Image (spheres, rainbow, N blue to C red):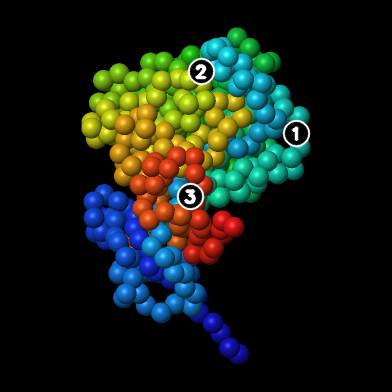
Amino acid sequence: MTTTGPRTTALTNIGTLVTNDPSLGDGPLGVRHDAAVVFEDGVVTWVGNSADAPAADTGHDLGGRAVLPGFVESHSHLVFAGERAEEFAARMSGERYAAGGIRTTIEATRAASDDQLAANVRRLLDESLRSGSTTVEIKSGYGQSTRDELRSVQVAGRFTDEVTLLAAHVPPPEYADRGDEYVAMAVDEMIPACAPHAKWIDVFCERGAFTLEQSRAVLTAGVAHGLIPRVHGNQLGEGPGVQLAVEMGAASVDHVTHVTDADIDALAGSSTVATLLPGADFSTRNQYPGARALLEAGVTVALGADCNPGTCYTTSLPFCIAIAVRDMHMTPAEAVWAATAGGAKALRRDDVGSLRIGARADAITLDAPSYLHLAYRPGVPLIREVFKDGVLATAAN
Protein backbone atom coordinates (compact mmCIF):
# COMPACT_ATOMS: atom_id res chain seq x y z
CA MET A 1 0.00 0.00 0.00
CA THR A 2 1.33 3.40 -0.95
CA THR A 3 1.02 6.22 1.57
CA THR A 4 1.59 9.89 1.06
CA GLY A 5 2.71 12.40 3.67
CA PRO A 6 1.56 15.94 4.14
CA ARG A 7 1.77 18.05 1.01
CA THR A 8 3.82 21.23 0.97
CA THR A 9 3.11 24.55 -0.72
CA ALA A 10 5.69 27.26 -1.28
CA LEU A 11 5.00 30.93 -1.98
CA THR A 12 8.15 32.37 -3.52
CA ASN A 13 9.36 35.63 -5.03
CA ILE A 14 7.33 37.63 -2.51
CA GLY A 15 7.97 41.36 -2.79
CA THR A 16 7.01 42.18 0.81
CA LEU A 17 6.14 39.52 3.36
CA VAL A 18 4.38 40.52 6.59
CA THR A 19 4.95 37.86 9.25
CA ASN A 20 3.92 39.78 12.42
CA ASP A 21 6.91 38.11 14.06
CA PRO A 22 9.73 40.61 14.74
CA SER A 23 12.20 37.73 15.04
CA LEU A 24 11.62 36.95 11.36
CA GLY A 25 11.94 40.44 9.91
CA ASP A 26 11.92 44.17 10.44
CA GLY A 27 9.73 46.07 12.89
CA PRO A 28 6.54 44.92 14.63
CA LEU A 29 5.26 43.49 11.33
CA GLY A 30 8.35 41.31 10.93
CA VAL A 31 8.69 42.45 7.31
CA ARG A 32 10.90 40.59 4.85
CA HIS A 33 11.63 41.42 1.21
CA ASP A 34 12.31 39.02 -1.68
CA ALA A 35 10.97 36.33 0.64
CA ALA A 36 9.32 32.94 0.63
CA VAL A 37 7.09 30.97 2.96
CA VAL A 38 6.29 27.25 3.03
CA PHE A 39 3.10 25.61 4.26
CA GLU A 40 2.80 21.98 5.29
CA ASP A 41 -0.17 20.17 6.76
CA GLY A 42 -2.01 23.44 7.32
CA VAL A 43 0.73 25.33 9.18
CA VAL A 44 3.71 27.54 8.37
CA THR A 45 6.90 25.46 8.41
CA TRP A 46 9.50 27.73 6.83
CA VAL A 47 10.11 31.46 6.27
CA GLY A 48 13.19 32.92 4.61
CA ASN A 49 14.79 34.35 1.49
CA SER A 50 13.17 33.34 -1.76
CA ALA A 51 16.44 32.01 -3.17
CA ASP A 52 16.75 29.59 -0.24
CA ALA A 53 13.22 28.19 -0.32
CA PRO A 54 13.08 24.39 -0.05
CA ALA A 55 11.42 22.31 -2.74
CA ALA A 56 7.67 21.89 -2.32
CA ASP A 57 4.91 19.85 -3.91
CA THR A 58 3.16 22.99 -5.14
CA GLY A 59 4.76 26.31 -5.90
CA HIS A 60 3.38 29.80 -6.45
CA ASP A 61 5.77 32.37 -7.90
CA LEU A 62 4.23 35.66 -6.82
CA GLY A 63 6.29 37.85 -9.11
CA GLY A 64 7.02 40.43 -6.43
CA ARG A 65 3.52 40.68 -4.98
CA ALA A 66 2.97 41.13 -1.23
CA VAL A 67 1.86 38.44 1.24
CA LEU A 68 0.18 39.07 4.59
CA PRO A 69 -1.44 36.91 7.26
CA GLY A 70 -5.14 36.43 6.66
CA PHE A 71 -7.23 39.09 8.35
CA VAL A 72 -8.79 38.14 11.68
CA GLU A 73 -12.33 39.50 11.89
CA SER A 74 -13.08 39.61 15.61
CA HIS A 75 -16.44 41.41 15.44
CA SER A 76 -19.28 40.45 13.09
CA HIS A 77 -23.06 40.07 13.24
CA LEU A 78 -23.79 37.66 10.41
CA VAL A 79 -26.82 35.73 11.70
CA PHE A 80 -29.72 37.86 10.57
CA ALA A 81 -32.45 38.20 7.97
CA GLY A 82 -33.58 41.19 5.98
CA GLU A 83 -31.80 44.48 5.37
CA ARG A 84 -32.16 48.12 6.38
CA ALA A 85 -31.18 50.13 3.34
CA GLU A 86 -34.06 52.57 3.82
CA GLU A 87 -32.89 53.24 7.38
CA PHE A 88 -29.40 53.95 6.05
CA ALA A 89 -30.78 56.35 3.45
CA ALA A 90 -32.81 58.18 6.11
CA ARG A 91 -29.76 58.47 8.34
CA MET A 92 -27.74 59.90 5.47
CA SER A 93 -30.51 62.48 5.12
CA GLY A 94 -29.87 63.70 8.63
CA GLU A 95 -31.68 61.41 11.05
CA ARG A 96 -29.57 60.45 14.07
CA TYR A 97 -28.82 56.77 14.66
CA ALA A 98 -30.42 55.17 17.70
CA ALA A 99 -30.20 51.56 18.83
CA GLY A 100 -33.93 51.03 18.20
CA GLY A 101 -33.29 50.13 14.57
CA ILE A 102 -32.03 46.76 15.72
CA ARG A 103 -35.62 45.76 16.51
CA THR A 104 -36.44 45.73 12.79
CA THR A 105 -33.82 43.04 12.25
CA ILE A 106 -35.03 41.10 15.29
CA GLU A 107 -38.46 40.75 13.71
CA ALA A 108 -37.04 39.57 10.36
CA THR A 109 -34.61 37.15 11.99
CA ARG A 110 -37.30 35.54 14.13
CA ALA A 111 -39.41 34.99 11.02
CA ALA A 112 -36.59 33.35 9.02
CA SER A 113 -35.87 29.63 8.92
CA ASP A 114 -32.58 28.15 10.07
CA ASP A 115 -31.70 27.38 6.45
CA GLN A 116 -32.38 30.96 5.41
CA LEU A 117 -30.19 32.27 8.22
CA ALA A 118 -27.41 29.81 7.34
CA ALA A 119 -27.54 30.77 3.66
CA ASN A 120 -27.07 34.42 4.56
CA VAL A 121 -24.13 33.58 6.83
CA ARG A 122 -22.52 31.55 4.05
CA ARG A 123 -23.01 34.39 1.55
CA LEU A 124 -21.38 36.92 3.86
CA LEU A 125 -18.55 34.60 4.84
CA ASP A 126 -17.74 33.99 1.17
CA GLU A 127 -17.70 37.76 0.66
CA SER A 128 -15.51 38.18 3.74
CA LEU A 129 -13.08 35.51 2.50
CA ARG A 130 -12.73 37.30 -0.83
CA SER A 131 -11.79 40.40 1.19
CA GLY A 132 -9.04 38.45 2.94
CA SER A 133 -10.63 37.46 6.26
CA THR A 134 -9.66 33.87 7.09
CA THR A 135 -10.85 33.82 10.72
CA VAL A 136 -14.27 35.27 11.56
CA GLU A 137 -16.08 35.64 14.87
CA ILE A 138 -19.89 35.53 14.56
CA LYS A 139 -22.35 36.96 17.07
CA SER A 140 -25.97 36.19 17.71
CA GLY A 141 -28.12 39.06 18.99
CA TYR A 142 -30.96 39.40 16.48
CA GLY A 143 -33.19 36.81 18.14
CA GLN A 144 -33.36 38.15 21.69
CA SER A 145 -35.54 35.26 22.81
CA THR A 146 -34.26 31.95 24.15
CA ARG A 147 -35.55 30.08 21.10
CA ASP A 148 -34.12 32.45 18.55
CA GLU A 149 -30.79 33.06 20.26
CA LEU A 150 -30.34 29.29 20.52
CA ARG A 151 -31.07 28.98 16.79
CA SER A 152 -28.63 31.80 16.08
CA VAL A 153 -25.67 30.36 17.97
CA GLN A 154 -26.32 26.94 16.49
CA VAL A 155 -26.34 28.39 12.97
CA ALA A 156 -23.15 30.37 13.68
CA GLY A 157 -21.52 27.21 15.00
CA ARG A 158 -21.86 25.58 11.59
CA PHE A 159 -19.28 28.04 10.27
CA THR A 160 -16.90 29.06 13.07
CA ASP A 161 -15.61 28.07 16.49
CA GLU A 162 -15.65 31.76 17.45
CA VAL A 163 -19.34 31.97 18.36
CA THR A 164 -20.52 34.83 20.56
CA LEU A 165 -23.81 34.88 22.42
CA LEU A 166 -24.87 38.52 22.29
CA ALA A 167 -27.54 37.83 24.87
CA ALA A 168 -28.29 41.49 25.44
CA HIS A 169 -28.24 43.53 22.23
CA VAL A 170 -31.36 45.63 22.84
CA PRO A 171 -34.57 44.71 24.69
CA PRO A 172 -36.90 43.20 22.05
CA PRO A 173 -40.34 44.72 21.39
CA GLU A 174 -42.13 42.54 23.95
CA TYR A 175 -39.74 43.82 26.64
CA ALA A 176 -39.87 47.50 25.66
CA ASP A 177 -39.15 49.63 28.75
CA ARG A 178 -38.69 46.43 30.78
CA GLY A 179 -34.94 45.95 30.55
CA ASP A 180 -34.60 44.43 34.02
CA GLU A 181 -37.17 41.76 33.18
CA TYR A 182 -35.42 40.97 29.91
CA VAL A 183 -32.09 40.60 31.69
CA ALA A 184 -33.67 38.30 34.28
CA MET A 185 -34.99 36.11 31.46
CA ALA A 186 -31.60 36.10 29.73
CA VAL A 187 -29.82 35.14 32.95
CA ASP A 188 -32.32 32.44 33.98
CA GLU A 189 -33.21 30.93 30.59
CA MET A 190 -31.29 32.13 27.57
CA ILE A 191 -27.71 31.90 28.77
CA PRO A 192 -28.03 28.39 30.28
CA ALA A 193 -29.66 27.14 27.07
CA CYS A 194 -27.23 28.77 24.66
CA ALA A 195 -23.91 28.56 26.51
CA PRO A 196 -23.06 25.02 25.34
CA HIS A 197 -23.07 26.32 21.75
CA ALA A 198 -20.94 29.45 22.26
CA LYS A 199 -17.49 30.52 23.39
CA TRP A 200 -18.11 34.19 24.22
CA ILE A 201 -20.74 36.28 26.03
CA ASP A 202 -21.35 39.83 24.85
CA VAL A 203 -23.56 42.77 25.86
CA PHE A 204 -24.37 46.21 24.43
CA CYS A 205 -23.61 48.46 27.40
CA GLU A 206 -24.92 51.71 25.97
CA ARG A 207 -27.70 54.23 26.29
CA GLY A 208 -30.78 52.87 24.56
CA ALA A 209 -29.57 49.33 25.21
CA PHE A 210 -28.45 48.08 28.66
CA THR A 211 -27.25 49.82 31.82
CA LEU A 212 -24.06 49.08 33.72
CA GLU A 213 -25.89 46.94 36.29
CA GLN A 214 -27.84 45.03 33.65
CA SER A 215 -24.72 44.48 31.55
CA ARG A 216 -22.73 43.23 34.55
CA ALA A 217 -25.50 40.75 35.37
CA VAL A 218 -25.47 39.34 31.83
CA LEU A 219 -21.69 38.97 31.72
CA THR A 220 -21.55 37.44 35.20
CA ALA A 221 -24.13 34.84 34.22
CA GLY A 222 -22.21 34.07 31.04
CA VAL A 223 -18.97 33.59 32.94
CA ALA A 224 -20.75 31.26 35.38
CA HIS A 225 -21.65 29.09 32.37
CA GLY A 226 -18.10 29.00 31.01
CA LEU A 227 -18.27 31.86 28.51
CA ILE A 228 -15.61 34.56 28.10
CA PRO A 229 -16.76 38.20 28.24
CA ARG A 230 -16.76 40.73 25.42
CA VAL A 231 -18.42 44.16 25.53
CA HIS A 232 -19.94 46.60 23.06
CA GLY A 233 -19.16 49.90 24.73
CA ASN A 234 -18.68 53.65 24.36
CA GLN A 235 -20.07 53.77 20.83
CA LEU A 236 -22.69 56.50 21.11
CA GLY A 237 -21.16 58.48 23.96
CA GLU A 238 -19.05 58.23 27.08
CA GLY A 239 -20.30 55.51 29.36
CA PRO A 240 -19.37 52.60 31.60
CA GLY A 241 -18.64 50.01 28.90
CA VAL A 242 -14.86 50.28 28.90
CA GLN A 243 -14.59 50.20 32.67
CA LEU A 244 -16.97 47.21 32.85
CA ALA A 245 -14.91 45.33 30.27
CA VAL A 246 -11.72 45.86 32.26
CA GLU A 247 -13.45 44.96 35.53
CA MET A 248 -14.75 41.70 34.04
CA GLY A 249 -11.45 40.79 32.36
CA ALA A 250 -13.13 40.91 28.96
CA ALA A 251 -11.11 39.84 25.95
CA SER A 252 -12.15 42.99 24.15
CA VAL A 253 -14.31 46.08 24.33
CA ASP A 254 -15.57 47.06 20.92
CA HIS A 255 -16.30 50.48 19.34
CA VAL A 256 -14.47 52.59 21.99
CA THR A 257 -15.42 55.73 20.11
CA HIS A 258 -16.03 58.03 23.09
CA VAL A 259 -13.53 57.49 25.91
CA THR A 260 -12.11 59.45 28.81
CA ASP A 261 -8.51 59.58 29.98
CA ALA A 262 -9.54 57.22 32.80
CA ASP A 263 -10.90 54.75 30.24
CA ILE A 264 -7.64 54.83 28.31
CA ASP A 265 -5.60 54.35 31.48
CA ALA A 266 -7.78 51.39 32.49
CA LEU A 267 -7.33 49.73 29.10
CA ALA A 268 -3.58 50.37 29.11
CA GLY A 269 -3.27 48.62 32.45
CA SER A 270 -5.31 45.60 31.39
CA SER A 271 -5.28 42.72 28.95
CA THR A 272 -8.51 43.90 27.32
CA VAL A 273 -8.15 44.74 23.62
CA ALA A 274 -9.78 47.88 22.23
CA THR A 275 -11.44 46.76 19.00
CA LEU A 276 -12.12 49.76 16.77
CA LEU A 277 -14.89 49.52 14.18
CA PRO A 278 -14.47 52.48 11.81
CA GLY A 279 -16.93 51.10 9.28
CA ALA A 280 -19.72 51.65 11.78
CA ASP A 281 -18.66 55.24 12.37
CA PHE A 282 -18.40 55.78 8.62
CA SER A 283 -21.93 54.42 8.10
CA THR A 284 -23.48 56.38 10.97
CA ARG A 285 -21.48 59.61 10.56
CA ASN A 286 -20.34 59.17 14.12
CA GLN A 287 -16.94 60.51 15.12
CA TYR A 288 -14.05 58.09 14.67
CA PRO A 289 -12.23 56.56 17.65
CA GLY A 290 -9.09 58.29 18.86
CA ALA A 291 -6.71 55.54 17.83
CA ARG A 292 -3.57 57.61 18.37
CA ALA A 293 -4.34 58.26 22.04
CA LEU A 294 -5.00 54.57 22.61
CA LEU A 295 -1.86 53.42 20.83
CA GLU A 296 0.39 55.98 22.48
CA ALA A 297 -0.92 54.90 25.88
CA GLY A 298 0.07 51.31 25.14
CA VAL A 299 -3.45 49.93 24.58
CA THR A 300 -3.64 46.85 22.34
CA VAL A 301 -5.80 47.81 19.35
CA ALA A 302 -7.68 45.61 16.90
CA LEU A 303 -9.67 46.56 13.81
CA GLY A 304 -12.95 44.86 12.94
CA ALA A 305 -15.38 45.25 10.05
CA ASP A 306 -18.53 44.88 12.20
CA CYS A 307 -20.69 43.57 9.36
CA ASN A 308 -24.34 44.02 10.33
CA PRO A 309 -27.48 45.04 8.44
CA GLY A 310 -28.11 48.31 10.24
CA THR A 311 -25.00 50.34 10.95
CA CYS A 312 -22.16 48.79 8.94
CA TYR A 313 -23.07 46.50 6.06
CA THR A 314 -19.51 45.74 4.96
CA THR A 315 -17.29 42.69 5.31
CA SER A 316 -14.18 44.47 4.03
CA LEU A 317 -11.30 44.85 6.44
CA PRO A 318 -9.20 46.49 3.67
CA PHE A 319 -11.84 49.25 3.63
CA CYS A 320 -11.53 49.59 7.41
CA ILE A 321 -7.74 49.72 7.17
CA ALA A 322 -7.99 52.61 4.71
CA ILE A 323 -10.36 54.52 7.01
CA ALA A 324 -8.13 53.85 10.03
CA VAL A 325 -5.14 55.32 8.25
CA ARG A 326 -6.94 58.28 6.67
CA ASP A 327 -9.29 59.31 9.47
CA MET A 328 -8.00 57.69 12.68
CA HIS A 329 -4.34 58.63 12.11
CA MET A 330 -3.01 55.09 12.36
CA THR A 331 0.05 54.28 10.30
CA PRO A 332 -0.43 51.65 7.59
CA ALA A 333 1.69 49.24 9.66
CA GLU A 334 -0.42 49.83 12.78
CA ALA A 335 -3.64 49.30 10.86
CA VAL A 336 -2.46 46.09 9.22
CA TRP A 337 -1.23 44.74 12.57
CA ALA A 338 -4.58 45.62 14.17
CA ALA A 339 -6.52 43.77 11.46
CA THR A 340 -4.37 40.65 11.78
CA ALA A 341 -2.45 40.15 15.03
CA GLY A 342 -4.72 42.59 16.87
CA GLY A 343 -7.82 40.66 15.87
CA ALA A 344 -6.13 37.46 16.99
CA LYS A 345 -5.44 38.97 20.41
CA ALA A 346 -9.07 40.07 20.66
CA LEU A 347 -9.99 36.41 20.17
CA ARG A 348 -7.19 35.22 22.45
CA ARG A 349 -5.69 33.23 19.60
CA ASP A 350 -1.97 32.76 18.99
CA ASP A 351 -2.31 30.46 15.98
CA VAL A 352 -3.75 33.02 13.56
CA GLY A 353 -2.92 36.59 12.62
CA SER A 354 0.74 35.88 11.88
CA LEU A 355 2.92 33.86 9.53
CA ARG A 356 5.41 32.71 12.13
CA ILE A 357 6.60 29.11 12.25
CA GLY A 358 3.81 26.90 13.60
CA ALA A 359 0.97 29.35 12.90
CA ARG A 360 -2.01 28.39 10.79
CA ALA A 361 -1.20 28.69 7.11
CA ASP A 362 -3.76 31.45 6.50
CA ALA A 363 -2.39 34.05 4.09
CA ILE A 364 -3.43 36.57 1.48
CA THR A 365 -1.59 37.83 -1.56
CA LEU A 366 -2.05 41.34 -2.95
CA ASP A 367 -2.05 42.70 -6.45
CA ALA A 368 0.57 45.11 -5.13
CA PRO A 369 4.20 44.94 -3.97
CA SER A 370 3.53 46.08 -0.38
CA TYR A 371 0.92 46.13 2.38
CA LEU A 372 1.09 49.94 2.12
CA HIS A 373 -1.19 49.74 -0.90
CA LEU A 374 -4.14 48.67 1.26
CA ALA A 375 -4.38 52.28 2.45
CA TYR A 376 -2.67 53.88 -0.56
CA ARG A 377 -5.26 52.49 -3.01
CA PRO A 378 -8.55 52.60 -1.09
CA GLY A 379 -11.54 50.87 -2.63
CA VAL A 380 -9.44 48.84 -5.09
CA PRO A 381 -9.88 45.04 -4.90
CA LEU A 382 -6.26 44.21 -4.15
CA ILE A 383 -6.79 40.75 -2.64
CA ARG A 384 -5.45 38.37 -5.29
CA GLU A 385 -5.42 34.99 -3.55
CA VAL A 386 -6.51 33.70 -0.16
CA PHE A 387 -4.95 30.61 1.42
CA LYS A 388 -6.82 28.93 4.28
CA ASP A 389 -5.02 26.17 6.20
CA GLY A 390 -2.42 26.13 3.44
CA VAL A 391 -4.94 25.53 0.66
CA LEU A 392 -5.89 28.04 -2.01
CA ALA A 393 -9.42 28.97 -0.97
CA THR A 394 -10.22 31.76 -3.42
CA ALA A 395 -8.46 33.65 -6.18
CA ALA A 396 -9.29 36.69 -8.28
CA ASN A 397 -10.06 36.05 -11.93
Q: Are marks 2 and 3 in contact (CB under 8 Å)?
A: no
- Residue 166 location (% of width, % of height): 55, 31
Residue nearest the observer in this picture, 75 or 188: 75
Question: Whole-Å distance between the Cαs marked 2 and 1?
Answer: 26 Å
Picture quarter containing residue 176?
Answer: top right
- Residue 126 location (% of width, % of height): 61, 49
Name the residue carrying label 3: 382
Question: Whole-Å distance between the Cαs marked 1 and 3?
Answer: 35 Å
What amino acid is found at the position of numbered circle 3 in the picture?
Leu
Residue nearest the observer in this picture, 164 or 321: 321
Q: Are marks 2 and 1 in contact (CB under 8 Å)?
A: no
Q: Is residue 214 left or right of residue 328?
A: right
Name above or below for residue 322 compared with residue 238: below
Question: Whole-Å distance between the Cαs marked 2 and 3?
Answer: 40 Å
N-term mark: 2 or 1: 1
> Residue 103 bears which disc, if any?
none
What amino acid is found at the position of numbered circle 1 in the picture?
Ala
- Residue 235 location (% of width, % of height): 44, 21
- Residue 375 location (% of width, % of height): 39, 41
Query: In what quadrant of the picture does the N terminus appear?
Result: bottom right
N-term mark: 2 or 3: 2
Name the residue: 34% across, 20% down. Answer: 259
Name the residue carrying label 2: 210
Name the residue carrying label 1: 112
Q: Can the viewer see residue 346 in this picture?
A: no
Q: Nearer the viewer, mark 1 or mark 3?
A: 3
Name the residue: 61% across, 16% down. Answer: 90
Dot 1: what SS?
loop
